[in-house]
Amino acid sequence: MSVLNGRKVLLAVSGGIAAYKTAQLVRLFIKAGAEVQVILTEAAKDFVTPLTLSTLSKREVFSHFYNDDEKEAKWNNHVELALWADLMLIAPATANTLSKMAHGVSDNLLLATYLSAKCPVYFAPAMDLDMYKHETSKENFARLQSFDNIMIPAESGELASGLSGEGRMAEPENIIRFIENHLLQQLPLRGKKVLITAGPTYEPIDPVRFVGNHSTGKMGYDLAEEAARNGAEVFLVSGPSHLHLQNPNIHITRVQTADQMHKACLEVYAEVDIAIAAAAVADYRPKNVASEKIKKKDSCLHLELEKTVDILADLGSKKEKQFLVGFALETENEFENACLKIERKNLNLIVLNSLRDAGAGFGVPTNKVTLIDAHKAATDLPLMTKENVAAAIFQRIIQMTHA
């Protein structure tokens, strides 16, 4: 799976002959799993049509700050476009556009969006060889790179002028490869191994019935995807769940019981750098499991329960280099109980859930949590999707482990 998968790409096209190659660029980004939003300058429309790029990207192409439709006049907010993007690519980046970028000119939508961008910005120069080698162009390249923009070097070959030399825009395949390689180098968890538990455990009563809970595993699966997105190799130990992941960097072991989950965790725990216990492990199990289905009777069914293994506590007792994260689902004295769990189980961080909040807990796509570290410093997160909760958790882990 490409590192571009799931990323939002803002492709800004200026007016050079190489603009015709952006149709292939859009196709390659989408093939890699990215979303693509295109901005065209007015001059770029002479080389590639908005219809072509909107058809390929499945999104409206923007060229102006506003449209001139009298019936549906609309402001195209350059700030919102910039905030939407995970990365911005200016390709082709003509000498004129690069000069304006380097000196803060903001006379079209592309340039205003560039000045508003907080994401990584890549630019792929495209110009004739003498323009490419000119001292002014070199100064502009250096100035833009001093702003932490990333230059994708031009390639050598036949140019539109008929001359041959350096200055032609890098081929679309090479642009994609350059960005992928650069992103991989920047991933904060590159080279790290992460263990994550997810879902419920089912403790059998008989061959048909079990003691379990309402966990779907979504929080743990979202954590696994976020870890992989940040470059980690992920070991996901999942209780029963209908969820599936297809990512070569996520290795899934499926289990049923707490004992099975414990064993699967211990098999990889010594080699991981981060462990997150997001599973809702059953605290108790039937002491005696019937070999045959228990028949329904008029009298009550009495089950003798015994404690299951405390997986998180055992991982805490065996902790060496690992950064260990637990979850706590509390209904009373939430903060105090979570802090006690940090101490008892030797955790670095705990994620506190409260069932008091609507939209949080099992079986819903959202969650509202508090992150508490070993020093009892707490960060309250607002209600958000579990994908965003996973991103916030890893942002905190990365901050703490890279300090």
Image: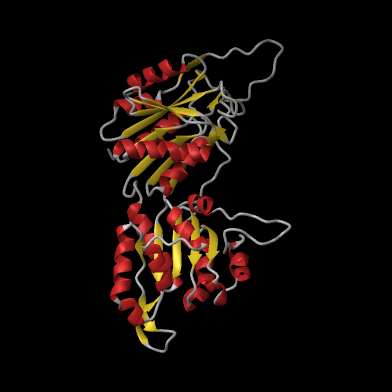
| Rendered view: 296 above or below 216 | above
Front-most of 42 and 16? 42
Q: Residue at 50% of width from left, 36% of height from top?
A: 219
Which quadrant would residue 209 be assigned to in this image? Answer: top right
From where the camera sits, is residue 216 visible? no
Q: Residue at 36% of width from left, 67% of height from top?
A: 152
The image position of residue 382, as x and y in percent, is: 51, 31
The image position of residue 239, as x and y in percent, is: 51, 35
Tally the marks: 0
Front-most of 304 and 266? 266
Which quadrant would residue 182 be assigned to in this image? Answer: bottom left
From where the camera sits, is residue 132 visible? yes
Q: Is residue 395 left or right of residue 25?
A: left
| Rendered view: 348 above or below 123 | above
Among all residues in the image, which is located at the extreme left? 320
| Rendered view: 210 above or below 274 | above
Among all residues in the image, which is located at the extreme top? 299
The image position of residue 202, as x and y in percent, is: 54, 28
Q: Residue at 48% of width from left, 21% of height from top?
A: 283
Among all residues in the image, which is located at the extreme bottom? 162
Q: Is residue 206 left or right of residue 133?
A: right
Q: Is residue 242 left or right of residue 121?
A: right
Q: Quadrant of the C terminus?
A: top left
Q: Residue at 42% of width from left, 72% of height from top?
A: 96
The image position of residue 145, as x and y in percent, is: 32, 61
Its colouring scheme is: secondary structure
Front-most of 167 and 397? 167
